[in-house]
Image (tube, rainbow, N blue to C red):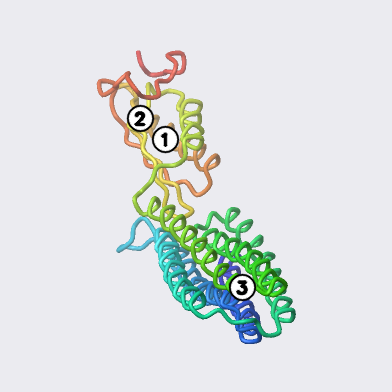
Amino acid sequence: MDQTKRLAVGSVGIGAIVLGLKYFAYSLTGSIALYSDALESIVNVATAVVALFAVYMSAKPADAGHPFGHSKVEYFSAVIEGVLIVIAALSILRQAYLGFLNPTPLDAPILGMAINAAAGLLNALWCWVLITQGRKQRSPALIADGRHLLTDVLTSVGVLVGVGAAYWTGIAVLDPAIAALVAVNILWSGWGLMKDSVGGLMDEAVPAATLDRIRKVISAQANGAIEAHDLRTRRAGKLTFVEFHLVVSGGMTVADAHDICDRLESALQSEIEDARVTIHIEPENKAKHSGVLVLPRKQIRGDG
């Protein structure tokens, strides 16, 4: 089992432990705010299972039915997580509304807050691991799971402050008020998660800085060619697809043109991790000379 899969499995286990602790804290106190925190942990477990499935599927090699691989499945995972987050937020808002109608004092708040704090600390540590390793492994599913946990950690801090304020001031309505704020925060998180993932599903181009790196590599490594144009990029999970047309002299041999392509592919794969490069060779009469990467004339060979 590789590192990404181990982390996905670990998320399921950590999520189950945190859920147990938070629900126990809620059962002790009857706090709607702690209930909202526990409910979000149920979503954490569900999304961790979805992320595990996505990581497993995305690691499968390309096949006849999926020649470009399965890496986009991680974006579906992140979208599903966003939907579940929104559902959890709506449920919390319902409980908060009922709490506003009938505010009640809390039971055993100190013990409940201590247990919830322990769960939050465990979540914070695992959140750091997921985001750090998710970026290292270039896994949208792990990063999405880590960002969701970060929201959960911040939520837990706010909940503890609110429950503490409700207990020490005796203002019972603070408890459902904090729960409502938690729900709004969760809704915002879910929207951001779905927005980022939809961009990946829609074949969003690489960031401008990455595109600039790609252009520089092509310019430096395409010795012997005339120009490169129609450069297109897209991301699919941890993969980056790079496609462009390379113009060469009409008198250049196929073998020489192939050597340039091999050099470009190797350089791009060294610069951009998990790059998949497709180059279309064109004769010099196809040169556009406008809005494209044009190589210096001194680099051209075989051009007569």
Which quarter of the picture shows residue 174?
Answer: bottom right
Q: What amino acid is found at the position of numbered circle 3 in the picture?
A: Gly
| x then y, percent, for residue 277 | 41, 43
| x then y, percent, for residue 16 | 59, 80
Q: Secondary structure at mark 1?
A: helix
Given this view, does label 3 or label 1 mark the residue nearer the observer? 3
Distance from the alpha carbon under mark 1 to that under mark 2 = 9 Å
Distance from the alpha carbon under mark 3 to that under mark 1 = 42 Å
Q: Look at mark 3 in the image and give the residue it sits on.
A: 10
Q: Is residue 239 left or right of residue 278?
A: right
Q: Residues within 10 Å of mark 3 (few under 14, many from 20)?
A: some
Q: Residues within 10 Å of mark 1 (few under 14, many from 20)?
A: many
Q: Is residue 220 left or right of residue 73?
A: right
Q: Identify the residue at horizontal 68%, vertical 69% (top origin).
A: 165
Q: Look at mark 1 in the image and give the residue it sits on.
A: 261
Q: What amino acid is found at the position of numbered circle 1 in the picture?
A: Cys
Q: Identify the residue at horizontal 47%, vertical 78% (top origin).
A: 98
Given this view, does label 1 or label 2 mark the residue nearer the observer? 2
Front residue of this view, candidates 270 and 249: 270
Q: Earlier in the sequence, mark 1 or mark 2?
A: 2
Q: Residues within 10 Å of mark 2 (few under 14, many from 20)?
A: many
Q: Identify the residue at horizontal 60%, vertical 79% (top origin).
A: 31
Q: Earlier in the sequence, mark 2 or mark 3?
A: 3
Asked if marks 1 and 2 touch (Cβ < 8 Å), the reply is yes
Distance from the alpha carbon under mark 2 to that under mark 3 = 46 Å
Q: Look at mark 2 in the image and give the residue it sits on.
A: 246
Asked if marks 2 and 3 touch (Cβ < 8 Å), the reply is no
Front residue of this view, candidates 169 and 66: 169
Q: What amino acid is found at the position of numbered circle 2 in the picture?
A: Leu
Q: Secondary structure at mark 2?
A: strand
